[in-house]
Amino acid sequence: MNGFLLAAGLGTRLKPLTDKIAKPALPIAGLPMLVYPLNFFFEAKVKKLAVNTHHAPETIRAVLEKIEQPWELYISHEKKLLDTGGGLKACEAFLKEERVLLANADIVAGIDIERLLRFHEARLADLTLVVVPHKDADKIAPITLGEKDAIVDINRTLDKKSTGKHLYAGVAVFEPLLWKYLHKEPSSIVYTAYVSLIASGARVCAYTHEGTWFDCGTPENYHAASNAVASDAWYWQKILHPHIRTAFG
């Protein structure tokens, strides 16, 4: 399979930390933030990996260049920010032949990727989203679940009365069918491709992750993630791939 790492955000909410450095290159307990989701692609043994960049791209490249790459790497630099959907669409030619594991570069999570992939295959899913339980999900952007792990709505896009107790965790697995729903112009992958797949009747499933998960987009979450990883360093040293540990050891 192939992989896609979304690393092109502006990091506006983390200014001034992100004035001269891309958000995914900021440190979390002594390691660049992006190495935590990068570890997913080592676990999945991807053949190709695309990484999109925009703000301070040299800081993303500097991190990647320190790590031995077991895959064919493609860096898609966006002079004009394409958002999540347009950014992925720009990498279609590179990734389209295989199933794709996608991850946001600003999350820190202990997701069992091998289990996620088995889940996706067992359900013959066209798209599987990793979701996390959250007490305020219904106020933020609820994922609405149906029977047998099916996702029937995202953030009340298809039904104004939809509710949910889970949030999208920023990790997904998808089959090539998804490419037809993406747009080249700046757009959201969630509200163009994901919701369109649900509306089309495709098999869209939710894999629930109940372990460690941080979205590091706000100062509060960024500091919480840093503290949590630092206080459980043994766990992270155990699960991070040797190429990562060697590069930053």
Image (spheres, rainbow, N blue to C red):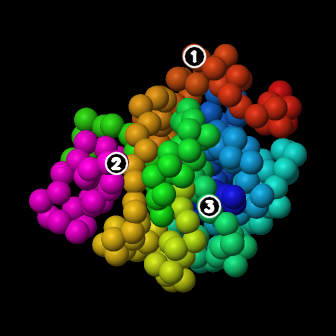
Cα distance, mark 3 to mark 1? 32 Å
The residue under the point 57% across, 16% down is 231
Given residues 46 and 134, the one toward you in this image is: 46
Front: mark 3 or 2: 2
Give above or below for 89 relative to 75. Answer: below
Q: Quadrant of the C terminus?
A: top right
Secondary structure under the numbered disc 1 in the rendered image: helix
The range drawn in magenta is 144-171
Q: Nearer the viewer, mark 2 or mark 1?
A: 2
Secondary structure beneath disc 3?
Answer: strand
Distance, label 3 to label 2, CA atoms, is 20 Å
Q: Identify the residue at image location x=61%, y=40%.
A: 114
State the residue at coordinates (32%, 56%).
151
Label number found at residue 100: 3
**Which percent across, then down, holds residue 169?**
44, 46
Left or right for 163, reference 143: left
Q: Which residue is mark 2?
A: 149
The reply to whether discs 3 and 2 touch (Cβ–Cβ < 8 Å) is: no
**Residue 111 image position (x, y, % from top left):** 54, 36
Mark sitting earlier along the chain (2/1):
2
Which residue was labeled with disc 1? Answer: 231
Counting every numbered tag in the picture gives 3
